[in-house]
Image (cartoon, rainbow, N blue to C red):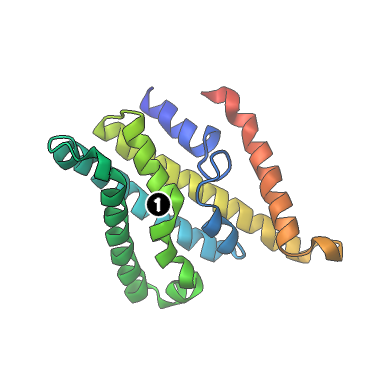
Amino acid sequence: MSLFGIIVSSILVNNFVLSKFLGICPFLGVSKKIETAFGMGMAVTFVMTIAGTVTYIVQKAILIPFELEYLQTIFFILVIASLVQAVEMFIKKASPALYKSLGVFLPLITTNCAVLGVSLLNIQSEYTLVQTVVNSFAAALGFTLAIVLFAGIRERLELADIPESLEGFPIALISAGLMSIAFLGFAGLV
């Protein structure tokens, strides 16, 4: 697949949140305000891109030569956890307001299944290093796009007249489902 095809596929067609349902926890938890959602998206973009690249190198340089492929998931989680700690320290120092608004969800990037899922799917798809970097970055942009759009919808829903039984989480799930259906319209692009 061409690099352009990987980008379009990862951002729109096979969006990890809306089509593979990876990363749902931060998608629902941090999407109440656009600013917070964008900050989380940028943190995930950094971690996912670097994690995808580093896990590819670990796979090719350590796990395969030493026949340790069975430790793949453990190694990948260690890489992701290390990167999240670095991002957390940077955000705490650079933007205390963003750090406070992300709250518990920032350390939870470690357990964000989208980050681990992208790393594993890069290896499973047998991408080259360049394809791995592009796919990881595009998947992270797809995550950011989905969470920011969803945050915008949720902000608008706060002003809407919604039946009491659907307020809060129920209307959020309905909106997420409608977003997922809308993204299915991109299925014919790749």
Q: Is residue 180 above or below residue 108?
A: above
Residue pictured at 31% horizontal, 71% vertical? 89
Query: In this rendering, would 90 be left or right of 173?
Result: left
Q: How many callouts does the rendering have?
A: 1
Q: Is residue 22 above or below residue 127?
A: below
Across and down, in percent, residue 181 comes to 68, 38
Across and down, in percent, residue 153 comes to 68, 55
Three-letter code, disc 1 = Thr
Residue pictured at 38% horizontal, 22% vertical? 1
Residue 137: image quadrant is: top left
Q: In the rendered image, is residue 32 in sight? A: yes
Q: Is residue 117 above or below residue 190?
A: below
Query: In this rendering, would 61 be left or right of 56?
Result: left
> Label 1 neighbourhood size at 10 Å, few (<14), some (14-19), many (20+)?
many
Badge 1 marks a residue whose secondary structure is helix
Across and down, in percent, residue 60 comes to 19, 36
Residue pictured at 60% horizontal, 51% vertical? 149
Residue pictured at 50% horizontal, 42% vertical? 16
Which residue carries the number 1 mark? Answer: 45
